[in-house]
Image: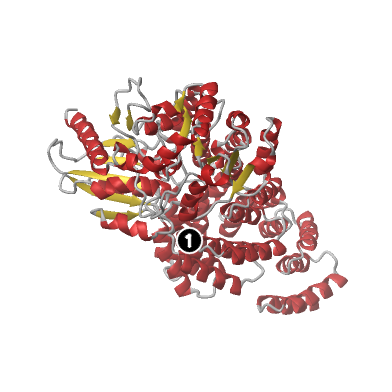
Amino acid sequence: MSTAQQVLELGLQHHQAGRLAEAEACYREILEAQPDHLDALHLLGVAAMQTGRAELAVNLLNRVAALVPNHPAVHSNLGEAYRGLGKFEEAVASFRRALQLKPDDVLAQYNLGNVLVEWGKLEEAIAAYRRVLTLKPDYVDAHNNLGIALARQGVMTEATEVLRRALQLAPADAGAWNNFGIVLAEQGRFGEAVEAYRRALELAPNQPEAHNNFGNACKELGQFESAVAAYRRAVELRPDSAEFQANLGNGLREQGRFDEAMAAYRHALALQPKRAETHHEMGNALAGQGQLDAAVLAYRATLELKPDYGVARCNLGNVLRDQGMLDEAIAAYRRAAESKSAQLVAQSNLIYTLHYHADGNEGEIRREQCLWNERFGGDTRPAVRYSNEPDFHRRLRIGYVSPEFRDHVTGRNLWPLFKEHDRTAFEIFCYSGVVRPDGMTQQFRERVDHWRSTLGVSDEELAEWVQRDGVDILVDLTQHMDGNRLAMFGRRPAPVQLSFAGYPEATGVEAIPYRISDRFLEPHSTEDRLLRIDSYWCYDPCGAEIGVNELPVQRNGWVTFGCLNHFCKVNEPTLRRWAKVLRTVRDSKLMLLSPEGSHRRKTWRILESEGVEARRVEFVPRCGRRAYLELYQQMDVALDTFPYNGHTTSLDALWMGVPVVSLAGRSAVSRAGLSQLSNLGLAELVASAEDEFVEIAAALAQDLSRLADLRRTLRARMEASVLMDAIRFTRGIESAYRQMWQRWCEG
């Protein structure tokens, strides 16, 4: 036996025992005497690759390949070395060469799949993993990686089955359980994902990725305490992970611990300053705190790093909308809708926001609604055979879908209906997406027969629930607003589906043909499936024990106009219209609800350009409900917005004794003021043109006797009207349900 062979065998012993430095010393000793010794060159290249010196490994292995071009193992190892350098094209070429020389090389085929995944060529990677499993059907890692690749391609059913097979082969494989959880979470099956991650952590308690994934699933289920605990453990195990730090921030944000969340985001950015996701998550936290300018900066930083980040662009649109910058918001939504991950939400946000736009038109809204149907209302509509008994007189099962069964404007608007429902004639199901339940959530639960939390539930699974519950009439209470489940309605899980309560416009979703409205909102509509009740609204102060005070002008000496609507309704034409009112009513002032930021400065500039000094305009910040209602005690006359009138905000004003002057248009959202004021017998406060609006507001403000009378009588007038007749309101809706049901029974 030659000396070189003895040294090589010693080097191999060191190599196999993991003593790489000693192994390298042996290989180098051989190469000093024989520079082209193939085995020494090859093994030194492998050792270099294993110790992270990919460039050296590539150089050494290329020398070997030049000397023995038909050695499959050399090309396979060269592929791994190129992969370490991030040179995916060269890596793929090397693996393919190895497989030409040895087609049944399972490891080369598996590594080819891995590098194709990293290169973003998922279809080719999937094909490679399939070939691996043809050669070796019990290769667990190949099942694992194939499952994840299929999930990334959206082939969820097969991905799930492939990972189930991996778990059958290796039930104690923590990585397989973690991957199974990932695929379940991708399908929105977060409850099942939690159990998969829990199993992974039982097998490998110190696996940081599994703790992080467990936290993500818990967060989706609204289990924020468990989520934060999981994120903290992930951070303990891997303190240098920017992703885990940022996720901890997300969990803390959901708990309302803003300062701690921001500290976690800053820590994450210190670890990885150019991580786009962290900038985005910080933007979400800032937006939630009303720090809109700072949120815009965070979102723009996100998009500089990752221009195709659709969700971030969509959230940028939300903040721009909240600042009243509707053109910019619409542009952001259109761009976000180009991204598959954000398309559904962005398209809904675009449709909803177009209703606010001063230059919006029915044709543009209809076009976007048609596009929504093309994208989300077609493929998910199987032919459904309903087992519901077509009996007109029987007790009907009504399902309500909303994320707002809580102390929120939508929840308060719904409360009269739930309080007065005839439970002997209707069996009530609530499909609740409430993230943070409160006392009012519990009140809703006590008023229904069945309560289902939909947090972490996919559209497909939710549709299955509705069908399994035998719901006869399914009611969408959100329309295109945040948290909607319109795509689930597209699956047509109930024989009768309608939208109501979010805002008085059509969703345009073909699977939701019915709507409820009133004769003032849509007097001329000939829609066959539009059912009118006496009033679209029924007001309930929900325990707000705040009295009506004396007229502020009598105390102040000047008239205070005001608008406490969300600022996205306050567009430039509306501000200029209000400015005319202020110019007409000498020394009058204007109160507006708005968070601090550039939009306040923009508002001042517009009003000053119309001759209204900044001193006459007071901005008040967002606040809790009681403090918000008390603001009306400082207001004499409320000025409505256009084209999107105030809805519940106007009812709050009227309840507090503040008359509302409104401008009516053609769309339903621009006739909300007309509907409410007409039902109070105050239709004379509604204008049909801008000049008339100014005249009505000015005349009312200067008639202190009438203002004082309205201050004293508005609350009693409301209490005596249909606007607060909960029984009449509820029976009207129940009658509409019966009409819809009769049509279905008659075919």
- Residue 520 visible (yes or no): yes
Q: Mark 1, residues whose alpha carbon is within 10 Å: few (<14), some, or many (≥20)? A: many
The residue drawn where x is 54% and y is 29% is 698
Q: Is residue 606 above or below residue 84?
A: above
Viewer-nearest residue: 683 or 50: 683
Image quarter of residue 109:
bottom right
Q: Outermost residue toward the right? A: 32
Q: Is residue 253 above or below residue 556?
A: below
The residue drawn where x is 48% and y is 46% is 154
Where's the C terminus, which quadrant? top left
Q: Viewed as shown, does residue 76 lie left or right of 421? A: right
The residue drawn where x is 49% and y is 40% is 344
Locate residue 203, reporting x and y percent: 46, 74
Locate residue 507, reporting x and y percent: 41, 33
Q: Viewed as shown, does residue 73 lie left or right of 648? A: right
- Residue 513 visible (yes or no): no
- Residue that badge 1 annotates: 219
Q: What kind of residue is marked 1?
A: Lys
Q: Is residue 395 above or below residue 282?
A: above
The residue drawn where x is 41% and y is 34% is 377
Q: Viewed as shown, does residue 253 lie left or right of 384? A: right
